[in-house]
Amino acid sequence: MKGKKFVRFLIVVGLVSSFLIGSGSVALAGPAEWKFFTYLPSNDRVVKAYRDMVADIGSATGGQLKLNLYAAGELPYTPVDAVKIVSTNKVQMSDGAVGFQAGDIPEFNVFGMPFLCTTFEGFFQAVDSAAPIMNQHLLDKYKIGVLFHWTMPPQNLWTVKPVKTLSDIKGKKIRAWNPEQVTMLKILGAIPVSIASAEVPTSLQRGVIDGAITSALSVNDWKLYDFVNYGLMINFTMGHQFVLMNMGQFNKLPADVQKTLTQKGEEWFDKFKALTPQFESEARDSLAKHGMQLFELSDADLAKAKEIMRPMWDEWTGKHGPLAEKLLMEVNAALGR
């Protein structure tokens, strides 16, 4: 499986690079204890999966690597901090939404291009081509390794009042969580608002925003159905995520622990590949039970949206340079374009 190959490739490169630059390849004398930060709230279904992963890794390493998982609010970090806190060893591992990392790696948000990749199948097909490029850049610039890449379910629009067409979006205050969503909303005539995930429920309740862009999974896990009644199922992007680790600390682990952690990264890549579509299906069923109405764009509106957004891809690569251009080319090729 290509997904497994890119995980192994990164670790090998990380070990060789660390040896060459002398960043410390001496194994720790005793058990290692790492902080693992997630920006997601503790009741999120993904966090529950991370807890299982942490327990699995601890067991598989015979207690030689202990991962202490910290959810949102338990450490003084925000969703945009993943690259910074891992590269500076404030935490040794962190998950991250790629779209939140625009301050450090804006070139990576290729899956944030509206209507470029809109399905789980497409994402896992295309990430095989994009991941090695991303992994090498993170290693070279930040001495960060990627345990595995995965994706949140498709990103859609969730609103207090019904939004059924593109024209209904105009003038609405919509929470966006990355620069590409801000651009998209402006093109559609909406008013983008940037707020942290934890502030979304109260902002909806108080009328600060009319809606939010996120996945059905997040709407369900965060109980946003208490504040929004409608979903416009555009599936305009996938929510690219990754699990990062400090390679200096990785290289201090005994060789057998390094090998086990790498293998577990491969296994959990496969598990998340299976879990997230399941989460999406279960979340949509739950939202329906809570009385939410889900709308689909008409074929005409969908075609119009794709036509309007296509120039944004080229503008994005022009802004972010050769790395962004290469990633867009790889993803397009993987998707058969």
Image (spheres, helix red, strand yellow):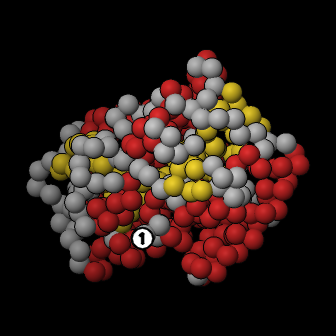
Residue 269 percent location from the top left of the image: 50, 46
- 274 and 111: which one is in front? 111
**Image quadrant where residue 280 sits:** top right
Q: Residue furthest right?
A: 300
Query: Residue drawn 35% across and 72% down?
Result: 142
**Image quadrant where residue 138 sits:** bottom left
Query: Residue drawn 43% across and 69% down?
Result: 103
- Dot 1, how many residues are within 10 Å of its Cα: few (below 14), some (14-19), or many (20+)? some
Residue 130 percent location from the top left of the image: 59, 64
- 24 and 123: which one is in front? 123
Residue 23 percent location from the top left of the image: 23, 74
Give the amino acid type for the residue marked by disc 1 in the picture: Asp
Task: Examine the rendered structure and indicate whether residue 225 appears above or below residue 164.
Answer: above
- 12 and 276: which one is in front? 276
Q: How many marks?
A: 1
Can residue 180 be seen by looking at this rendering? yes
Please indicate whether residue 212 sits to the left or right of residue 29 in the image: right
Residue 80 percent location from the top left of the image: 39, 59
Task: Examine the rendered structure and indicate whether residue 63 appears above or below residue 142.
Answer: above
Query: Residue drawn 20% across and 40% down?
Result: 63
Task: Examine the rendered structure and indicate whether residue 233 appears above or below residue 302.
Answer: above
Please indicate whether residue 115 sits to the left or right of residue 316 in the image: right
Query: Residue drawn 39% across and 42% down?
Result: 198
Q: Secondary structure at mark 1?
A: loop
Can residue 220 be seen by looking at this rendering? no
Q: Residue furthest left?
A: 29
Q: Which residue is mark 1?
A: 104
- 5 and 41: which one is in front? 41
Task: Examine the rendered structure and indicate whether residue 315 appears above or below residue 168.
Answer: below
- The quarter of the picture where the C terminus appears is bottom right
Q: Residue furthest top?
A: 289
